[in-house]
Image (cartoon, helix red, strand yellow):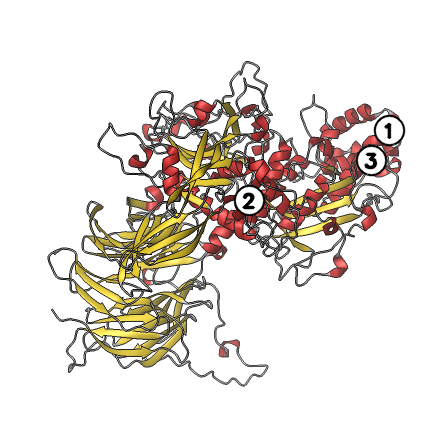
Amino acid sequence: MSTYRPVSRITASSFPQPITALSFDPVSDILWTGTNAGDVVAYYGTNGIRGVSFRVGGGLGVKKIDAGDNNVKGLGLGGEGLGLWAKGGMNKWFYRCEHHSNILTFSNTSNSNLLAASTADKELLYINSVTGKVVFQLPTTSVITQLQSSHSLLLSGSSDGYLRTHDPRASTGRSGGAESIVRAHSSSIQGLQTTGNFAFTIGLGERQSRPYPDPLVKVYDLRTMRPLPPIPFSSGPAFIQVLPKRPSTIAVISSEGLINIVDVSDPTATSEFYQLDLASYLTSFSVSATAAYMGFGDADGTVHILSQTEAENAVPLNGFDGRAIEWADTPAPLTKVEWVDTSPLNAIGLPYYDTYLLSSFSPQESGPLSPLPPGIPPLVLNTMKMKDNIAYAPFPKELKGHRNMNHADLRKQNGRFRSGKSRKTDQDPDTPIFEYSSGDVPRMYRRVEIEYSKFGVEDFDFAFYNRTEYSGLETHILNSYTNAVLQVMHYVLPIRRLAKSHIMTNCLQEHCLLCELGFVVRMLEDARGTNCQSSNFCKTVGVLAQASNAIELIDYGRDVAEVDYAHKIQIFHRFLIDHLSSEGNAFPENPSLLINSPSRGELAAAPITQLLGVDGKNLVTCLSCKAVREKENMTHIIDMVYPRKTSNESSPRTDFTSVLRNSIFRHMTHKATCQKCKHFSAFSSKRSISSRELPPILAINACVYNEENYYWWLNPSRGETFVKPKIRLHGQIDGLDDPIGADYELRSMVVQVMTKERHSHLVAIIKVPEAEDGGEDSSPWFIFNDFVVSNISQDEALNFSAKWKVPAILYFERINIREAIDLNTLPEETDEGILCHDTSISFNRDFKSIKHECLSIGELPKPGMLVAIDAEFVSMQQEETEFRSDGSNRILRPARLSLARVSVLRGDGPKQGTPFIDDHIHTSEIIVDYLTEFSGIKFGDLDPHLSRHTLTPLKLVYKKLRLLVDRGCVFIGHGLSKDFRIINIFVPPEQVIDTVDLYFLKARQRRLSLRFLSWFVLHEHIQLDMHDSIEDARSALNLYKAYHDFEDQGIFDQKLEELYKEGRLYNFKPPPPPQSIYALDSITISAPPQQHLNTLGGHLSQADAEIRANPQKFTDSNAYAFDSSWHP
């Protein structure tokens, strides 16, 4: 067997840029390279003669190249899509995903006419390799990062670390089309190769809740998906690729250029090692079809080639004399046409078409046509009915047979709804839960879910499931698994105070977790038992997580059963604290929070660091020369490290305080080159920190990842628990224990509830500060199971007697924390000037169309000030509904709406009805539906580059509304409960006047639309073309003024009866205004409301009289019906 030797280097460009992809041509003497600028360039022979070049798409690097016999397939990082080119450079097709989703990788399949590709939207696409059209697509449970074709299967590696096999012949399958599944790595798979019955993977592991390169190449037998002995590679594998012509042999390469060639079928064989001479690091790797050459691209734009051919033999790159090299296609010159009036149009030639012509048939599509499907039997058509564009009909008994019968039990709906009848016999809330077959998990710990009635999520009676004065958080949103950590942050009072003070500052970051945390704790603080949701916080988590690729997003209701939430929440915990520290850092203007800190008066660290930071010095000792050096060390979160379980059962069991102390001051050893003795020797590292310097708050990741770790948490004996409500920690100074201790008290925990079926979720167990003064008979401990909040005893809170309860996060506070921390230096007042300044991020704002006038200094809000408000929304996710055969439906997942526009008007004074806020809200998410008919929002209105409106970030609008709430303003609007819910702000009921409740008869059980009320009460026709938030807010304000006039005259009840009577006549829909007899001029807000009311009890206009005499003549059959769940 010949060894590899370096033969040449190819410099790809005149300036350094990484070679991001390589592929040897299988039939010609060509090496295809992809550059960081998005170009694919062909180099001929080992001398590197530059040939054909073309762009893949986008301004970023080429991610993957696959050279075939007749063409070249390429994919770019720019997200422009996947394409196929002739070897002369002519593009044959280019596929772009819908909704601008990025294609992450692609691969050939066992079917030569199919390509497989994965997208960032968790989809697996099968694309016709001739036409570039999608044949079918499958949803996947995780983002696929690697694809590789085997002899009959398609292998995929995902961001969750799972290796899956797919059958390209099947368009459906379990787990997103996967046939077999195995967990290969703790985190994302970075490389995947297959040969014969072997599959090889490299990826990321996790150490101390942080990703790191897994030093093992995992090997699996594809026949059984059984793991085989892995291949160790201490330098960290960056690339792997099998060697053709050498079965079961694989090349493993590090980014530093170390190459290891291993035969996995012969463990006794000697491995081959090579080291490239690099000035930078490797960015790509490829092997030729005969394994005669290996190519390596580096970050400086150089391609290094190794060959196992003899030096005197000039062997082509493909290993044999193949096809002649194709040079760049030269476009045919355009024919000059002498154009005259009589010139025929066919002299011009065919224009360019975006879609395929009818004559463009592929060879696979030109076969015989299949027969037409049979028609629907007339018996079915005669009884067919329509509902929501869905046709349904009972199946006639004449057509019934055994194969048509399907017996299914409908799922019991356990949820309690406000629209249902009151159940006075219910003593214990019948919480809607996922029923488990195991009876071990107590009911209060079981996973809860929200049921949806026909009126949506607003109809769910959250108060029935939470009878405490402490608010829970809802679950039906993306990343809602973070609810438990949010509750913990809320009830750690210094963090709550810090987050609340941050929203008072002028934070310039559009996506700031500390701001969003401040908004959430304010909402939880004000709600006092009313359910809340953290949708804005979770949205920001998603934006920041995708930007840094730090944590995986989890969509509620679509997570797989194998999710280890304890592990995920600890990763998120570190992610959150790191962001809170950096976002709250105003150095050098950070306030000093610690009263007795030795550094008080000096420049202070970030506030979160002052509260949570374990700031000590590491004493690093060289074990060879005994040289000692100090190294500063700062960490916010302590990862617990457990001792090994001893076989001697009589030995004393280690308590929690000792394990925690050893985790803080743990002794570590590592190897490195000593700067003093210049030897590569072992080093010993110890942390030194005094008891006084221990932080006021200890944030701890429990790190219980296996049975051995959980052994320590099991109750040592009956009546005892591993974790104690109070502990005393002693610091360590220069290896000696500090005689002075620091007393800490357990404040909260996040635990994972794991059933035997491996379904898991998270709950927070918290000692609520506000409940500590409730007396000796009441317990301050509460369990926050999303929106269900229950009071528990301290013994129950600390009890870990069963394996279904797994600790994840713990928070301890120093007992004298309130005396040790000075929070009075934090800002407590919001700058009211934001209501006086006009802010917009739109580049094309039309100043002539501005409809609002900001408040002056004298108009700043005061308690009781009336403001009218209305908001418009766009859809970020469509509603998912299950349609049954009987025509009924059930909401599986409600639509997710996002704030798009909000208008706030002055409610009284000389400028009554004049808006002072009219902001469109910028969003970086993909909008599924603009709902233009109901929102008035059109494409481009929320884009800074296209919008002509006042466009502002969501956080700024939220601050304005938050300021109005804090100043005691009274909000007037129509259907405000839904608006405030989607905006994600809690407004005290005494500050809300909702016209949907003012004009409501409880006995009629029907709430009236704003459009109908405006027509009947105000004689105004609104929402004729589309909705306008200023118009709607002004109408609600007029209705409120009219209500007071009715009350002053003592005729409101009479008018309300007339209103419902008239509504039944018109089906609660205003008739369309006939242009010939009805004036559409709206009544101005400045006019006294009595002018609008004269006709209500007296004379009708001629138009109204004609409409009421012939209602059917003017009734719009296509108008929308309004019920109690909908208000425009």
Contact (CB < 8 A) between labels 1 and 3?
no
Contact (CB < 8 A) between labels 1 and 2?
no
Q: Residues within 10 Å of mark 3 (few under 14, many from 20)?
A: some
When asked about the image quadrant of residue 70, the answer is bottom left
Q: Earlier in the sequence, mark 1 or mark 3?
A: 3
In percent of width and height, residue 265 lies at 14, 55
In percent of width and height, residue 397 lies at 40, 26
Element marked by disc 1: helix
Front tag of 1 and 3: 3
Query: Relative to residue 1122, is residue 694 depicted above or below?
Result: below
Element marked by disc 2: helix
Element marked by disc 3: helix
Amino acid type for the residue under numbered disc 2: Phe
Q: Earlier in the sequence, mark 1 or mark 2?
A: 2
Contact (CB < 8 A) between labels 2 and 3?
no
- For the N terminus, the quadrant is bottom left
Q: Which residue is mark 3?
A: 1041
Q: Which residue is mark 2?
A: 537
**CA gap, disc 2 to disc 3?**
37 Å
Q: Earlier in the sequence, mark 2 or mark 3?
A: 2
Query: Relative to residue 16, is residue 261 depicted above or below?
Result: above
**CA gap, disc 1 to disc 2?**
51 Å
In this orientation, does residue 269 appear?
A: yes
In percent of width and height, residue 1101 lies at 86, 37
Amino acid type for the residue under numbered disc 3: Lys
Q: Which residue is mark 1?
A: 1097
**CA gap, disc 1 to disc 3?**
17 Å
